[in-house]
Amino acid sequence: MKRRDFITATALAAAFGLAGKPVYNVLASKDALASKTGKRLAMVIDLKKFEGNSEMMNKCVDACHSMHNVPDIEGAKEEVKWIWPEPFEHAFLEQNNQFIPENIQNNPILIMCNHCDNPPCVGVCPPKATWKRAEDGVVMMDWHRCIGCRYCMAACPYGSRSFNWRDPRPKIKNITANFPTRSKGVVEKCTFCDERIVKGLEPACVVASKMYEPEAMVFGDLNDDKSNIRKILSENYSIRRKPELSTQPEVYYLI
Amino acid sequence: MLDKIFTGGKKYWAWMIFLSSIIGAGTLAYLHQYEVGLGVTGMGRDVTWAFYISQLTFFVGVAASAVMVVLPYYLHDYKKFGKITILGEFLAIGAVIMCMTFVFVDMGQPLRVVNMFLHPQLTSPMFWDSVSLMGYLVLNIVISRVVLNAERNGVKPPKWIKPVIYTSIPWAVSIHTVTAFLYCGLAARPFWMSAIMAPRFLATAFAAGPALLIIICFVLRKVSKFDVGKDAIQKLAVIAAYAMFANIFFLALEFFTAYYSGMHHHTQHFQLLYVGLEGNSSLVPWMWTSTVLAAISLYILINPNTRKNEKILGFGAIAVFLSIWMDKGMGLIIAGLVPNPLGYVVDYTPTLIELTISAGIFALGALIISALYKSVLTIRRQV
Amino acid sequence: MYNTGKVVLGIIVFVLIFSSPFLINMSGDTSGMPEMTVPEGECLYPKDEMRANHMDILNTWRDKVVREDIRYTEINGEQVEMSLSHTCMKCHESRKEFCNVCHAYMEVNPYCWDCHVDPDDHKPTMTIDEEAAMEAAAKECALKEEEKAIQESLEINAEEEK
């Protein structure tokens, strides 16, 4: 083979590779919003209603973590968390303006998986152990399949994913029998309580918050134009975490 | 060909036993990690990738750098690389096996890695990285075996091997490009999200790989009668010089875009590496050592007087290799993950277990490469 | 080839040793097979099919529930929840006395219970019937029942913490 022929052949092979459908999908899908068919589950968190109510915030976290057998591990290194309070300057670090009101500065904010419309964690997962459900937009996890490579954690811009650095069982205070624990070596995160929404129930954190405030956390379908969540979002200006990354987070905050 | 591995003098066997004992220690450490979980490493929920993945990144580069001897020899018919080409290919085999082992020990559920091929996510660079690494391993095994067997029998290699060799050239570039894609497509990590990540990786690879080959050639001269010749070594040094210069140039470009734009999310990672961030300066001495080594190596490689003096060149090659290893084999990965997406600055120190496992993998690579080199030298009667 | 005889002999010995477990097994001797306590009543599938294929059934269930969000399947005209904990273990109450007996004999070590909660260690906080009742109630009177359930579980937690 002449060198010129070789270079031509290489270029052709490269072009052929580029034409693959997966590549096309990646290029084409990034701008699209979530599918118009099916549900588009989302959450609104009203920060005003959480102000000074750390008890409500803790109950939301407890409800989630106890129901889902989330271990209670001390120290930031190996911590596992699905939903947790974070100061404004960390939850919204790009939007931490200099002279923000004290109530915003001093009240922590509940953060969790944003169930993004363009979830960066999904595309990178080598064995498809995490994916976005077409029917309702939940970013799901399959703990049977996760190989523990932690690529999703590198890809998540929100720090929403946790890894089981050791067997979590000894660190779970009270095991809830009708929900699995995780084994060591897998990643876990909030699943919008998929085990509850399939029964028509709302996520545990939302229910816990309702014991204190009716609309501190609102959960619903953005594709349903009569839903309460749509009404709230159209009447109030909301912010989202790192919207500039085009991930289209589905957790909205009212400030 | 492999039968020659088991013939050799006392020194050879002492070296192999030494390496095996390190592998043994690494295996024991790994069994502990397997039992307890990755919590025995210094990694945590923020620094989720660290020493292991850094080594993968670095050694993919070493593997890819075989192309720097294969390409001149086969495409440009540069005869003086005739003796060294097979060394480059064997180095690639050892390096790829190290890479795969580093990925394996980094997995939380290592027994499930097969899921990656049962249910492949075609948009995941990690899937493509493993595919391309495996392909590259097969290519190098086939090529080196066929060529060496032909040499042993005193005949010309079969014709069909030529297209295979030509395939291995862009393939080598692709393995490191895909490795760069692991990082540079992540919007969550501004430090990695740079379009010149792949060129940077290739530049570092083509500097560190030839530098390692130079060191190996010097070692082989000491322990055997094998001599690749002064010209081949000088050519490798020139390649390393250009690549090292390109590497520094690319790094300067990264500095420029980060600091001229002044974007905090880009500058803070450089700050962490070179001056320290929010009281965390554990990587600063490390990175400055790397920088100083880079400067020394560039001087030695560019100045013809120092480059042509093989004693000094040896130091230059070591400086290139260490400088790049410190940067790419640690700094680059940690700084990409710190500060974390929530803006917290966290620390990472590898644990003894982590380092023992890594030492075991280094020894495994060295063992494979030693054994393969042994077989070449025996066949060429140059032990 | 040198030493052909020895090499062939070596290979034969190796193959025999390697395949000895299979050869012994082929003799049909199944003594030592453990006795299992099987609950009364009908299982979802015939016993032999369950013995041979329960792992495949569970794997299919797992993928249906986790990956496709389909929780129920129809077996013999009945809607069955595809759940190891909720369906299988409802009759086969004990892992120790059921699963483990055979798995120990077969020397297999499936990882189901690494995550799913072992019913021998932890009884469900709610029985299946209670949960169904809760679901029905929740649908009827909106969220009140489940609020209560969560409140209760929180209280239980708080108490046990003390």
Image: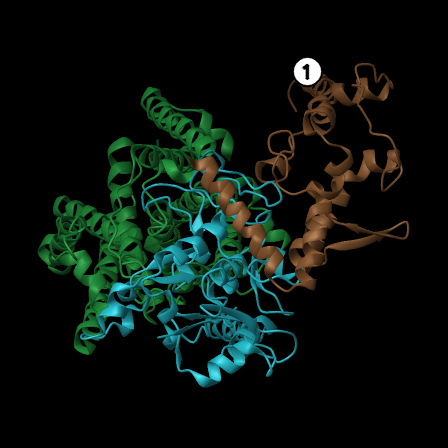
Q: In the image, residue B23 lies at what x, y percent?
A: 39, 29
Report the chain shown in brown.
Answer: C
Tell me if residue B23 comes above or below residue B311 in the rendering. above
Name the quadrant containing residue A164.
Answer: top left
- In depth, the one of B191 and A234 nearer the eye is A234
Report the chain shown in green.
Answer: B
Q: In the image, residue B167 lies at what x, y percent?
A: 51, 61
Tell me if residue B361 comes above or below residue A150 in the rendering. above
- In depth, the one of B283 and B296 nearer the eye is B283
Q: In the image, residue B46 lies at what x, y percent?
A: 34, 52
Question: Which residue corresponds to mark 1?
Answer: C6
* Chain for disc number 1: C
- Color of chain A here? cyan
Element class at badge 1: helix
Q: In the image, residue C46 lies at what x, y percent?
A: 89, 38
Q: Quadrant of the C terminus of chain B?
A: top left
